[in-house]
Image (cartoon, grey):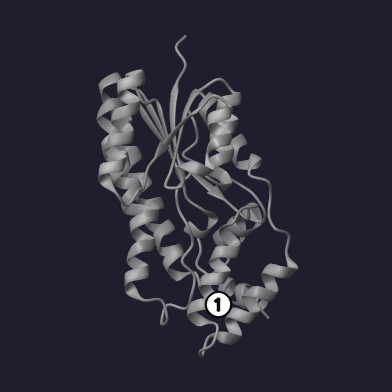
């Protein structure tokens, strides 16, 4: 049976890199894509292909997909993993930076999906994994624009699933909890940069204190396990979650009222 061809964005670090390496080990043909192509030598050494791709640059996305089709004639699996967390109080985050958050976490993902879909539809087969977050199910202080991007991604994914199912395409949402990566440090640095000195400085300090007191998160492998599980399932679930605090937070969000959940969050930041 011909090996399935996988495109993974955000493959230069964190979960994206782990997805690419894990699927290479599982026998897939893997293309790792990221802006920082020089940081993907490990993927190349493991037998994968490397693409320089920026999800805010349509030309680079189209060229990357064309390269895959030229070499292999197909894209079976798209893993939309590129993203970051724009933190800072909503009053302080410049709207240009908020727009960039939405562009990378949602609109770039959506455009790459549009480019890949005709190739999947023509073969009546495809699997699209959108890497959301448990932050797509609840909102916390200082992460407003990140939460907004993930809430939107959840709704986008639900509609995409309904529209593409008749063409043999599965859309799966992955909701990581806390995962070991550069993400948390970058988010905290952004919160400090934008809100660390103003009226929200106390909240930022509490965020740093909470971050320091907690585990750095689960290993990326727990999320890669979900990807492999869904790929091997005859009929994958629409959503999977794993990682530090993922299950308890999602359970409490479903159980508690808004006010009670607010109180729990603010107590955690005391």
Q: Residue at x 51, y 89 (%)?
A: 198
How many circles with numbers are drawn on the protein?
1
Q: For this rendering, which residue is in front, 163 or 129?
A: 129
Q: For this rendering, which residue is in front, 34 or 113?
A: 34
Taking 223 as reference, is 197 above or below it? below
Furthest-bottom residue in this view: 199
Indicate the position of residue 103 as horizontal and vertical percent values: 33, 57
Circle 1 crowding by C-alpha within 10 Å: few under 14, some 14–19, many from 20: many
Q: SS at mark 1?
A: helix
In the picture, measured across the screen, residue 142 lies left or right of residue 152, that is right
The C terminus: image quadrant: bottom right
Taking 246 as reference, is 121 above or below it? above
Q: For this rendering, which residue is in front, 235 or 194?
A: 194
Q: Residue at x 45, y 20 (%)?
A: 4
Q: Is residue 227 visible?
A: no
* Quarter-of-image position of residue 168: top left
Indicate the position of residue 239 as horizontal and vertical percent values: 50, 42
Indicate the position of residue 51 as horizontal and vertical percent values: 41, 36
Taking 54 as reference, is 76 above or below it? above
Furthest-front residue in this view: 38
Indicate the position of residue 221 as horizontal and vertical percent values: 65, 39
Q: For this rendering, which residue is in front, 125 or 257?
A: 125
Q: Is residue 190 visible?
A: yes
Q: Mark 1 — residue?
A: 192
* Quarter-of-image position of residue 101: bottom left
* Quarter-of-image position of residue 184: bottom right
């Amino acid at each position: 049976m011909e090996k399935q061809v996988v495109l993974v964005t955000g493959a230069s670090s964190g979960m994206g890199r782990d997805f690419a390496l894990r699927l290479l080990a599982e026998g897939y043909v893997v293309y790792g894509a990221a802006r920082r192509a020089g940081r993907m030598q490990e993927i190349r050494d493991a037998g994968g292909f490397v693409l320089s791709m920026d999800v805010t640059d349509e030309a680079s996305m189209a060229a990357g997909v064309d390269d895959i089709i030229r070499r292999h004639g197909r894209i079976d699996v798209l893993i939309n993993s590129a993203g970051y967390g724009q933190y800072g109080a909503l009053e302080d985050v410049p709207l240009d930076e908020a727009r960039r958050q939405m562009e990378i976490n949602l609109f770039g993902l959506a455009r790459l999906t549009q480019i890949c879909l005709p190739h999947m539809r023509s073969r009546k087969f495809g699997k699209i994994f959108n890497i959301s977050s448990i932050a797509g199910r609840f909102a916390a202080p200082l992460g407003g624009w990140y939460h907004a991007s993930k809430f939107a991604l959840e709704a986008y994914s639900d509609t995409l699933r309904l529209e593409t199912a008749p063409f043999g395409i599965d859309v799966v949402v992955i909701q990581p909890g806390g995962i070991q990566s550069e993400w948390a440090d970058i988010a905290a640095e952004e919160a400090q940069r934008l809100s660390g000195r103003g009226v929200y400085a106390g909240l930022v300090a509490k965020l740093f204190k909470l971050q320091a007191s907690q585990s750095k998160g689960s290993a990326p492998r727990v999320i890669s396990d979900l990807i492999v599980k869904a790929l091997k399932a005859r009929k994958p679930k629409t959503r999977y979650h794993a990682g530090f605090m993922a299950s308890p937070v999602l359970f409490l969000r479903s159980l508690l009222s808004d006010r009670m959940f607010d109180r729990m969050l603010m107590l955690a930041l005391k």
